[in-house]
Each structure stands twice: as C-alpha cells, then as structure tokens.
Image (tube, rainbow, N blue to C red):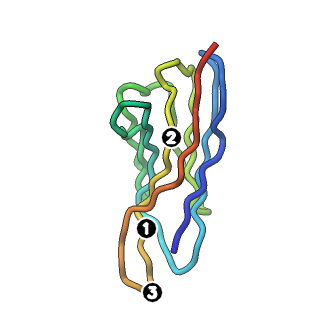
Amino acid sequence: QVQLAESGGGLVQPGGSLRLSCAASGSMFSINGMGWYRQAPGKERELVASITRSGRTNVADSVKGRFTISRDYANTVYLQMDSLKPEDTAVYYCNAEVFLIDRLREYNSWGRGTQVTVSS
C-alpha cells in the first residue's frame, strides 16, 4: 500500500505564503500524476493544481498567478502558495495516481489533508 502524508498547513495572514508538501511512501509502486485539491466547509472538493509524470502543470483559474505546483524525484509534490486570501481557507488534500507493480493495479490515493487558514 502507498500512503500520502501532507505537511505545511497552518494559520497565515492575508498576503502571506505557505508551502505544502506531500510525500508518498510504500513499496512496489510508481506514481504518475499528482495534484492538490481543497475543500472548504459546505463546499465541494475542487482541484487546485495538478502535475503529470513529465512535469506538465495545470492550475485552477482561482489561484493562477499565486500558486505553483512542483514535484521532485523522491515522489514528493509541493504547492507553493503566495498572496494568500481568506477565500483560500480550506483543507488541502494531496492526490496521486498510484500503480501497484506487484498487483498490476492502479488507483487514486489521497492524503488525510492539511488545514490552511488565512485570517488577519
């Protein structure tokens, strides 16, 4: 099995910055796409940003120009969040397209989420 662990959330003032990290761990797996979703109370979960295995990125219009997604060679994805606004307040979830090599099975893995609160 593969586990995703998010970190970097917290309380920040409007205009501030946070950097979220998500590390995948386990055995006998590979990861294709990765991404970040967020969900605010009473709202649907929405895609914030995604990145493919080859490094192509996509960012939602609501955060374009403020958020940047990236990944490294150790199965870790990052979300750099700048110029944060109160409306960015949500639980942010890491997502990964996981392929289990020994089971020849692909599935979508989710982290437990990390709280981001933007408030003065």
Q: Position of residue 31 (x, y in %)?
A: 46, 66
Q: What residue sits 49% from the left and 25% below the top?
A: 88
> In the image, 89: left or right of 10?
left
Q: Nearer the viewer, residue 89 or 53?
A: 89
Q: What residue sits 48% from the left and 72% below the top?
A: 30
> In the image, 18: left or right of 37?
right
**Number of marks in the rendered image:** 3
Q: Tag 2 or tag 3, which sits nearer the N-term?
A: 2
From this view, report whether residue 25 is shown above or below residue 62: below
Q: Position of residue 75 (x, y in %)?
A: 57, 62
Q: Residues within 10 Å of mark 2 (few under 14, many from 20)?
A: many
Which element carries disc 2, helix, strand or loop? strand
Q: Which residue is mark 1?
A: 98
Q: Nearer the viewer, residue 83 or 3?
A: 3
Labels 1, 2: front one = 2
Q: Which residue is mark 3?
A: 102
From this view, report whether residue 55 is shown above or below residue 46: below
Q: Which residue is mark 2?
A: 92
Q: What residue sits 65% from the left and 18% below the top?
A: 13
> In the image, 93: left or right of 120?
left
Q: Position of residue 9 (x, y in %)?
A: 63, 37
